[in-house]
Image (cartoon, grey):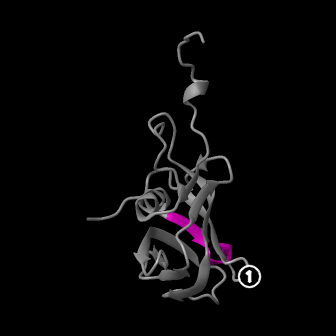
Amino acid sequence: MTERDATFEDGREAPLNLGAFDPEDLQILSSLTQDAVFPITEMSWRPGARRFALLVNRFRWEDAGRERHEAERVQSLLVVDNVLGVASQGIDRGDADMILSLLSVTFEPGEEGAGHVLLTLAGDGAIRLEIEALEVTLKDVTRPYRAPSKKAPSHPE
């Protein structure tokens, strides 16, 4: 094998396709989905498949090129498998125009690997998923696009 210098193409940013099977992995997915926004109509619970999915507009926190271009978002699928039940609070599911903002994704352990995945939303909303085993995936499904705000989200201290 011959050595060569790295090229620009070698450093291009690839779409994310990550899985979380333990709480530490889930922390990484949570940090990557912080401030993701989605219409309430982009939530899907399929009891027969035991799958809960969100199509979110995720801020690209991992984007190391923000100094070269404006802030970007990308559409991503956040999928939780092995879901036995779904509960929510602070969400008006009858309001089809509602836009939700995801703050964090955490795991509350139960017995023998079971537990709950908690999706904490801005404005005191939450979605609680009862799961048999922790299995969460995050996959980018579109090319990045310029964030409408043209800047990174911020949180007052």
Q: Nearer the viewer, residue 6 or 124?
A: 6
Q: Quadrant of the N terminus?
A: top right
Residue extent of the magenta highlight: 36-44
In the figure, is residue 123 to the left or right of 85?
Answer: left
User: Does any portion of residue 148 appear in the rendered image?
Assistant: no
Q: Residue 55 location in percent, x, y?
A: 64, 66
Quadrant containing the C terminus in the rendered view: bottom left
Q: Residues within 10 Å of mark 1 (few under 14, many from 20)?
A: few
Q: x, y (%) of residue 123?
A: 43, 79
Question: Which residue corresponds to the image point at 58% horizontal and 32% vertical from the top-left?
Answer: 12
Q: Name the chief secondary structure element in magenta.
A: strand
Residue 46 visible to an observer of this rendering: yes
Question: Could you tell me which residue is drawn at 55 percent across and 78 percent down?
Answer: 132
Q: Where 10 falls versus 15 (above or below)?
A: above
* Residue 44 sits in quarter: bottom right
Is residue 107 shown left or right of residue 138? left
Q: Is residue 131 magenta?
A: no
Q: How many marks?
A: 1
Can you give x and y, in whole percent of width and height, for residue 100 in the image? 54, 74
Q: Residue at point 62% right, 55% down?
A: 139
Q: Is residue 106 above or below residue 6?
A: below
Above or below residue 14? Residue 126 is below
User: Residue tagged by mark 1?
Assistant: 48
Amino acid carrying label 1: it is Gly
Q: 15 and 83: which one is in front?
A: 83
Q: Position of residue 16 (x, y in %)?
A: 58, 49
View extreme (top): residue: 2
**Secondary structure of residue under mark 1:** loop
| Above or below for 61 versus 115 | above
At 41% from the left edge and 77% from the top edge, which residue is drawn? 108
